[in-house]
Image (spheres, grey):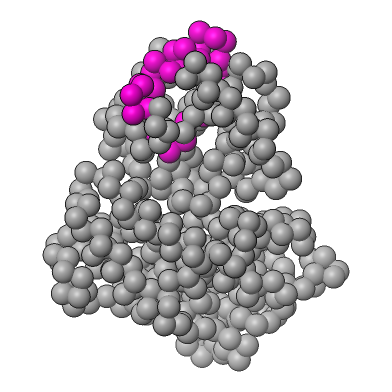
Amino acid sequence: MVFEILHEQSQRLLANTPMDFKRYLYNEVNWKNRLIGIKGARGTGKTTLVLQWIKAQNLSADKAIYLSLDDIYFSSNTLKSTIDEFYKLGGSVVALDEVHKYSNWSQEIKNIYDFYPSLKIIFTGSSIIDISKQQGDLSRRAVMYELNGLSYREYLSFIGIAEMPSFSLEDLLKENLNERSHWPKDFRPLQYFKEYLEFGYYPFVSEDMQSVHQRIRQMVRTIVESDMAELEEFDIRNAKKLLQLIFIIAQQVPFKPNISSLAAKTNIHRNTLGTYLYYLEQAKLISLLHETGNSVATLQKPDKIYMNNTTLLAALATEGYETGTLRETFFQSQLSPQYSLSAPKQGDFTVNGKFTFEIGGKGKTGTQLENKKNAWVVRDGVEYTTSTSIPLWMFGFLY
């Protein structure tokens, strides 16, 4: 009887899943694989993505089921026994959400994968999880993907403004995409840019724009007090200190960290602080920028710390933030999902150890990049430019 309730919940969710907008990852996942893992930050739309794919298959009700592993049902029932019942009733596709909330999840998924060879399994979890460190060896079995927040391109599609293709960084640098002819005739690239920066990174903006920042603050608390509690290395007694650390960083980004000073302000031991900064980055709350040419070790002091995205910055920086900070945060948030970023001696960012970018406003010149190869000025507040200058908003079209 309880299983029937779970099945009804699944069918109700599928029936109410919208199909009009799909995230970029929908077309990048190779859905033919039998074991697929999708991880990502809270609020980025992992659940909707999986439900959309299942709904698009038009399977009969007994063939597919969605299960959230933080459901109270799993406090007294095992995942394996639940899947066994589903399989015997004719099931062929199972979606497992919030897997990090279920103890020994990787081992049970491994067993299900091995013992039910005709069953397709899709699981989602926090961006913090590392399947290579889990007890069950899923790293050789699962094909993993990561879902990031909305790009500026996606946001324009999400709110019904325009459907436009994405392009690679190499395309942006090689092709003359600055020409107006490459874009829709009536397209005004800056019309919704500020709105996106402040509110548009998370898909729940569609529910109520005015409550986005409040929801983000609640989400950050949930990540620290709930998701990070699943990490063996994390002492839940430090949750309050970690929230204080996030608040301190948000008021000062781009933050050039003094580890000793930061440890003193938060009462977190300096040896532990490096690990916690690493996990905050994995949780997609902050981004760590290291010097160009230096190895990126877990405990190595970063050159700068940014908030992960501009909407997060706007929600947490209660004392305000500089326009320059907003620009740099946008740039790193749009490139970091696909490219390696570092801090050069000249300019603001080096990408893939090859391309250098200096970020600024309309009047930004390239004097800081003189005599430097593969270097570009990125200007905010302009629609289209030429030569070695590129509009900032265009970097929101990389995915």
Q: Is residue 69 magenta?
A: no
Out of 88 and 110, give the one closest to the viewer: 88
Provide residue 350's location: percent of width, then percent of height. 44, 70
**Front-most of residues 70 and 291:** 70
Residue 358 in view (yes/no): no
Residue 61: give x, y in percent of width and height.
Answer: 64, 19
Q: Nearer the viewer, residue 73 or 336?
A: 73
* View extreme (right): residue: 185
Is residue 156 in view from this perspective? yes
Splitting the image into 4 quarters, where does residue 59 fall?
Answer: top right
Give the residue at the far front of this rendering.
1
The residue depicted at 20 percent of the width and 70 percent of the height is: 266
Residue 88 lies within the magenta run: yes
Q: Is residue 314 above or below residue 209?
A: below
Q: Quadrant of residue 92?
A: top right
Tell me the residue at 31%/37% (across/down).
Answer: 132
For the residue pair 325 and 64, the one nearer the viewer reads as 64
Q: Quadrant of residue 81?
A: top left
Q: Which residues are magenta?
A: 74-99
Horizontal and vertical percent position of residue 280: 33, 59
Screen quadrant of the C terminus = bottom right
Q: Residue at x 28, y 43 (%)?
A: 230
36 lies above or below 79:
below
Q: Residue at x 40, y 12 (%)?
A: 115
Q: Is residue 29 left or right of residue 322?
A: right
Does 374 sit above or below residue 107? below
Relative side of 232 to 86, left or right: left
